[in-house]
Image (cartoon, rainbow, N blue to C red):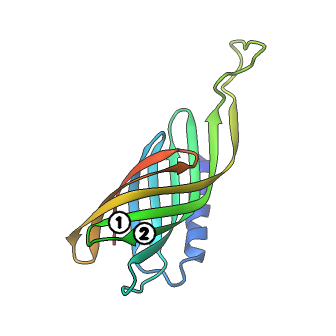
């Protein structure tokens, strides 16, 4: 568990390095192959464009998959509520081997894990609605080439 906390702290630190001109923060519950959470910081604060750019750090885990990553997200605002998004970054993953030892295992074997880095490239759609002054609730779906394949994110921008 300590390693996971260290990974999250490192991801947050890297996020803060890129956020020298950061504006709004965002937090989300991530639901997909592995459930978890993400945090992000808005990089551009220019309201005259129809784009919002965020740098995000995420951590998700279930019994078979652990995923931690950092990514850059661009939201293209089409209306006051609807937007599309494009995300690119990198994920660290650790997954239980699906087929085990081809020579046959014994009862003393523990689960074997494969781990590595994987690119994170995905696209999606989202809907946001105001819930207070300068605060929005959002729900988004993104699918792509990444450790968790697809996610539904529900969160707040502040």
Task: Pinpoint residue 56: horizontal percent, then vertical percent.
Answer: 51, 64
Residue nearest the observer in this picture, 45 or 20: 45
Task: Pinpoint residue 69: horizontal percent, then vertical percent.
Answer: 58, 56
> Few, some or many C-alpha atoms within 10 Å of disc 1 (few <14, some 14-19, many ≥20)?
many
Task: Pinpoint residue 28: horizontal percent, then vertical percent.
Answer: 39, 58
The residue that appears at 67% across and 22% down in the rendered structure is 99
Query: Mark on residue 154?
Result: none
74 versus 46 height, above or below: above
The residue that appears at 47% across and 67% down in the rendered structure is 40
73 versus 97 height, above or below: below
Residue that numbered label 1 is attached to: 83
The residue that appears at 64% across and 50% down in the rendered structure is 92
Residue nearest the observer in this picture, 52 or 3: 52
Is disc 2 in contact with disc 1, using a CB cutoff of under 8 Å? yes
The residue that appears at 57% across and 47% down in the rendered structure is 67
Calculate the distance from the C-alpha at mark 2 to the C-alpha at mark 1.
6 Å
Residue that numbered label 2 is attached to: 75
In this picture, residue 109 sits left or right of residue 70: right
């Amino acid at each position: 568990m300590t390693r996971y906390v260290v990974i999250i702290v490192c991801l947050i630190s890297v996020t803060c390095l890129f956020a020298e001109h950061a504006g709004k923060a965002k937090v989300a519950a991530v639901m997909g192959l592995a459930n978890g959470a993400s945090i992000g910081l808005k990089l551009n604060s220019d309201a005259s464009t129809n784009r919002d750019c965020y740098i995000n750090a995420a951590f998700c885990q279930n019994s078979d998959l652990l995923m931690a990553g950092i990514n850059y997200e661009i939201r293209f605002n089409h209306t006051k509520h609807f937007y599309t998004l494009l995300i690119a970054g990198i994920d660290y993953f650790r997954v239980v081997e699906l087929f085990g030892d081809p020579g046959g295992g014994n009862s003393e074997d523990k689960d074997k894990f494969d781990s590595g880095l994987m690119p994170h490239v995905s696209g999606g759609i989202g809907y946001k609605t105001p819930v207070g002054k300068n605060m929005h609730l959002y729900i988004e779906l993104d699918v792509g080439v990444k450790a968790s394949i697809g996610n539904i994110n529900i969160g707040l921008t502040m």
